[in-house]
Image: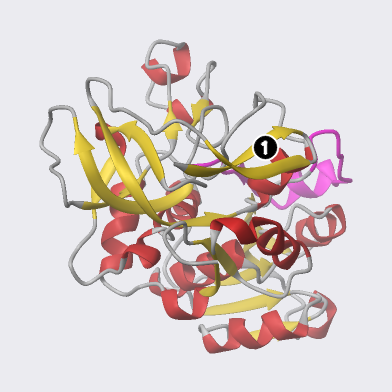
Amino acid sequence: MRAVLIETPGRFSVQEVPDPVPKAGEVVLRVDAVGICGTDVHIVDGEFPPTPYPIVPGHEFAGEIVAAHGGELTVGDRVAVDPSLFCGACHYCAIGRGNLCERWGAIGDTVDGAMAEYVAVPAANCYRLPDTLSTPHGALVEPLSCAVHAFDVLPRALGAHYLLYGAGTMGLLMLQLARSAGAASISVVDINAARLEVATKLGADATAAHADEFDRPQGWEIVIDCTGAIAAIEDGLTRVRRGGVYQQFGVAPGAATAAISPFRVYNDEITIVGSMAVLHSFGRAVELMGKGVIDADTMITHGFGLDQFADALRTFRDGSGRKIQIRPGELT
């Protein structure tokens, strides 16, 4: 079969690789769609330490089962796949916090993934897609499941006012979940005017290039960073209303630091919470996608063939799209 192979950081190509064969408890999918996310770019650039090389990337994907080795799933089932590979034995797995697993792994991040015509995956990680959901839309389930987990750990109340930093894919998913979760208002900050137009279409009450443009001197009950940019993080921490919550959802560089006022955290009783990856949220994300909570047609802007992986990466890097997908079965 053909697959994108990252041989070393910065060096990749489409190559012929062996067809996957399912082991006990595994299935093989024909990959219909796989999304590109920031982690894939970090892997290409050699900036994701858990990744071994060479590797086939791709962890946001859906497809049709073409081979199965036991279990309830059968050939022809359309599924989305939770890429998480938890060890099941460490302290964090034992207390139900597998996303913090001491031996954490993921399909496409630490083992070969779905930027290929076919991929073998654990059957237990597969979730059937409802008939109402197309397979490319099903590939949005993985990033949505990250956003669902973020809401799981986010202290909140009905009627809260939200301030979101970032109107990229993850910010727009968080926006739509906040709207569904009963937000009183949602304000969105992004320096990209085109992205702000999409945020308005998806339900933002107010948008701006900087939070100073909003008329809310008392602050917001919930402030969420979806950028990982230090300037946005530091600004967002100053915008939390007394008694409110700040969530770090965007991924900042590992060595980065941000200035914070410990006195204000103490005096205003501000809660700071992080959210990392997927945890017990994938099945609910499938259901939310199936019910139309997410406007998938607006979220997915580009589809490329395998041979266009370099073009897809350039499109991602220049910020001209939202969710960019590789469609391995399509002609290039």
- On the image, the x and y values in percent for residue 241 come to 68, 64
Q: Residue furthest front?
A: 16
- When asked about the image quadrant of residue 318, the answer is bottom right
In this orientation, does residue 13 appear? yes
* Residue drawn 81% across the image and 76% down it: 191
* Residue drawn 27% across the image and 21% down it: 23
- Nearer to me, 219 or 112: 112
* Residue drawn 56% across the image and 37% down it: 56
Q: Is residue 158 left or right of residue 208?
A: left
Q: Kindly state the secondary structure of the residue where label 1 is placed.
A: strand
Indicate the quadrant containing the C terminus: top left, top right, bottom left or bottom right: bottom right
- On the image, the x and y values in percent for residue 67 come to 21, 38
Indicate the quadrant containing the N terminus: top left, top right, bottom left or bottom right: top left
- On the image, the x and y values in percent for residue 57 come to 57, 41
- On the image, the x and y values in percent for residue 141 come to 40, 56
Task: Identify the magenta region.
Answer: 253-277
- Nearer to me, 255 or 53: 53
Residue wearing tag 1: 6
Q: Is residue 15 left or right of residue 27?
A: right
- When asked about the image quadrant of residue 254, the answer is top right
The vertical placement of 309 against 185, above or below, is: above
Question: Secondary structure of the magenta portion, mostly?
Answer: loop
Q: How many marks?
A: 1
Q: Is residue 261 left or right of residue 204?
A: right
Magenta stretch contains residue 81: no
The vertical placement of 165 against 19, above or below, is: below
Magenta stretch contains residue 261: yes
Amino acid bearing label 1: Ile
